[in-house]
Image (cartoon, grey):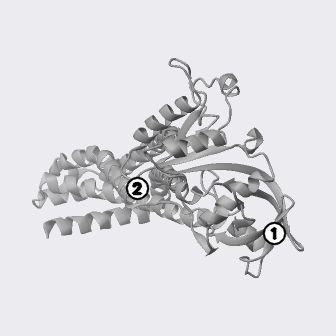
Amino acid sequence: MLFLKLFRESFLFAYDALRQNKLRTFLSLLGVTIGIFTIISVFSAVDTLRNNLQKSVNKLGSNSIYVQKWPWGGGGEYPWWKYMQRPVPKLKDFDELQKRSQTAMAISYEIGIANRIVKYKSNTVQGASIDAASQDHDKTWNFDFEDGRYFTGLESRAGSPVTVIGYDIAQNLFPYGGAVGKQLKIMGRYVTVIGVFKKEGKDILGISNDNEILLPLNFAKNIIDIQNENYNPQIVVRGKAGLSDVEVESELRGLMRSIRRLRPGQDDNFALNKTSILSDQLSVVFGVLNIAGIIIGGFSILVGGFGIANIMFVSVKERTNIIGIQKSLGAKSYFILLQFLIESIILCLMGGIIGLGMVYGGTFIVKALADIQVVLDTKNIIVGIGTSVSIGVISGIIPAYFAARLDPVEAIRSN
């Protein structure tokens, strides 16, 4: 009960200081507010980026490895002149991996043709991505269907003229629905739509099925050279459940070196890419952003902390008579110290809550303008509140200590 009374009295003193010195208090709280806003905004932005990255990784598959010509990432030395001499993955590589691999759950060969125009009657879509993949594509990638289905094994082997299209393609070509069963003319051939991918939206890596037209690989083989480097051929290998990507990668490297008859000591003429490469690189960026946010927010909080300390010193000066009366009536030194310390903490909490409120309001603005779901989790809120309390303790402890040490007689006689 004593603590509650002390808290109530301190709150009333803080409120009185706010009411009587609005401009001074506002300017002092501004530093704390901006500091908390900056730190929590950066943390939330990093969490949002990380969350979107995880969604991208889930699409790519955390246990999937991509056999490609070029390695991902350009950090440090990147001898591109060597990579240019590498051959692209071939159908022979794909066939041999299917025969020999013991760790793969699924293996697919895939190509992509970007920026194509697709028409259906008077409706046109520009910038469509036409992809072709072997049967296991649905096992090496993660996607859902809005309508229809995926290719059957017979359709893939026979190279049937069928296709699965993205949600945006379906909306633009068939605005009234009913895409499944319709025929599109693609690369000079008519194909029948058998499925529509569920809407995904663009993620941080720009990966989305929304603008994709997917064809069976054996159908595309009859129209174009699917091993042409211009189509960026790649082999995607997803490991069996329970196996780490390191085990799958180790076997895959050995098999590819054997298939391409590379001698011991020769460099690999292929790249084995996996999502952890992207995650590691982006983690470095996230770390830098976190540090930048802490530094910028720290300076703002430092200024705000000095402002709060100044308010508390002024408050001690203004209430010296009251402190003397309280001590003469038997108030202990710790009572006076806690009184001013709680007042300092309350002032800082007000700045922190305002900063958190600004971040919370900003999440709705970002959602409305950019259609991005900002992550503001409990951890960030605890960091904001905890930082505010810490600044309140640090800023208020010295003024509170001086107040507690005042001589009651001298305090009463002061003006």
Q: Residues within 10 Å of mark 2 (few under 14, many from 20)?
A: some
Disc nearer the start of the sequence (2/1): 1
Q: Is 394 or 356 nearer to us in this picture?
A: 356
Image position, residue 102 (x, y; %): 43, 44
Q: Which residue is mark 1?
A: 184
Rendered image quadrant of residue 129: bottom right
Q: Which residue is most to the left?
A: 330
Rendered image quadrant of residue 131: bottom right
Rendered image quadrant of residue 246: top left
Taking 333 as reference, is 277 above or below it?
A: above
Name the element at disc 1.
strand
Query: Would residue 202 be seen by someone viewing this image from the given angle?
Result: yes
Q: Is 392 or 383 nearer to us in this picture?
A: 383
The structure residue drawn at horizontal position 54% and vertical position 20%, both measured from the top left corner, is 263
Q: Which residue is most to the right?
A: 122
Q: Which residue is mark 2?
A: 380
Q: Nearer the viewer, mark 2 or mark 1?
A: 1
Q: Is 108 or 414 nearer to us in this picture?
A: 108
Image position, residue 325 (x, y; %): 18, 59
Image position, residue 118 (x, y; %): 83, 63
